[in-house]
Amino acid sequence: MLRIADVEAPNKRTRLGGALLDQQHRDQASNCVIRFITEAMAPGRFLQDRRRFDALRDGLTEALSLVGLRVNEQGKVARAAATATTLDEVARLAGRMRTELARRGVHPEVLRYCEEELLRESLFHAVFEATKGVSERLRQMSGLSGDGAGLVDQCFGAAAGVPAVRINDYGTGSEVSEHRGFANLLRGIFGTFRNPPAHTPRAAAGWALTEADALDLFSMLSLVHRRLDAATVRTGA
């Protein structure tokens, strides 16, 4: 489509790279690369797969940020706000994780406790801080001073009659069951994602988390915070 001469190569990746490099040498300019990116990233090509557009856009922006460029929402190459000179700056300018979190509509309370970690794409600390953020919010809501599963018991237990924090009217059997299930969900989150990082070195081989796992956890934490948005706190708790 762009009338760039093909080249012989053992695979598509080196074939494409070779063709663009040859054309760039002939033109003595990089316009052919920009034209190729613009054509390949045309939004109309991704009407049925927005996730792929976002992933490709962020991946391209990581590389282009080193020369002060980015791919915008129209799929075109544009000037970046700054030129990256380190890998941390590449991650910061590209913001791959933040793009996906924004697309998912992650609750602001999730981002509040892991801004720096997300910018550096440190999944280990981002997960730890975001999970700790739930405990902090429960303490602020209830006025209690516990932590982890113990705090969940204090907030959602019914030892004193009505729980200190409840996510519904806590009147019918179904409501009580839902309330207890939510408390169990919190205990599971703390046990799985908060306690291991608190006691395990970052480089430990036994505690690994992929980017997909982290994104799913952030979505789960968003659900938790949305339920807490509408929760009722017992007066004097």
Image: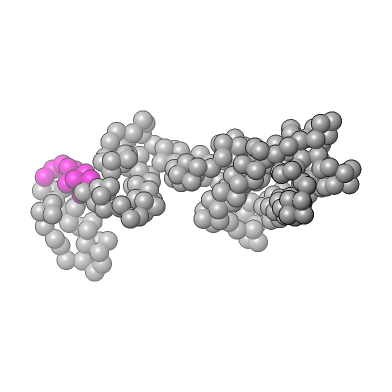
- Of residues 77 and 231, the one drawn nearer to the viewer in this rendering: 231
Q: Is residue 203 visible?
A: yes
Callout count: 0
Q: Position of residue 33 (x, y in %)?
A: 21, 47
Q: Is residue 113 left or right of residue 78?
A: right
Is 28 situated above or below 173?
Answer: above
Q: Which of the 4 quarters of the picture holds residue 96?
A: top left
Q: Would residue 86 be visible to someone looking at this image?
A: no
140 sits to left or right of 89: right
User: In terms of image quadrants, where is residue 165?
Assistant: top right
Is 141 part of what is drawn in magenta? Answer: no
Instruction: Please tell me which residue is depicted at 71% across the width and 44% down the height of the picture.
Output: 168
237 sits left or right of 53 in the view = right
Q: Against 163, is 235 above or below?
A: above
Q: Is residue 28 magenta?
A: yes
Quadrant in which the C terminus is drawn: top right
In the image, residue 143 above or below residue 88 = above
Residue ranking furthest to the bottom: 10
Left or right side of 13 for 96 = right
Q: Main secondary structure of the magenta part?
A: helix
* The one of 232 and 44 positioned closer to us in this rendering: 232
Seen at 62% across and 54% down, the residue is 203
Residue placed at 35% from the left, 39% from the top?
65
Query: What's the image's color scheme?
Result: one colour
x 63%, y 51%: residue: 202
Quadrant where the N terminus lies? bottom left
Q: Position of residue 130 (x, y in %)?
A: 63, 43
The residue range painted magenta reads 27-38
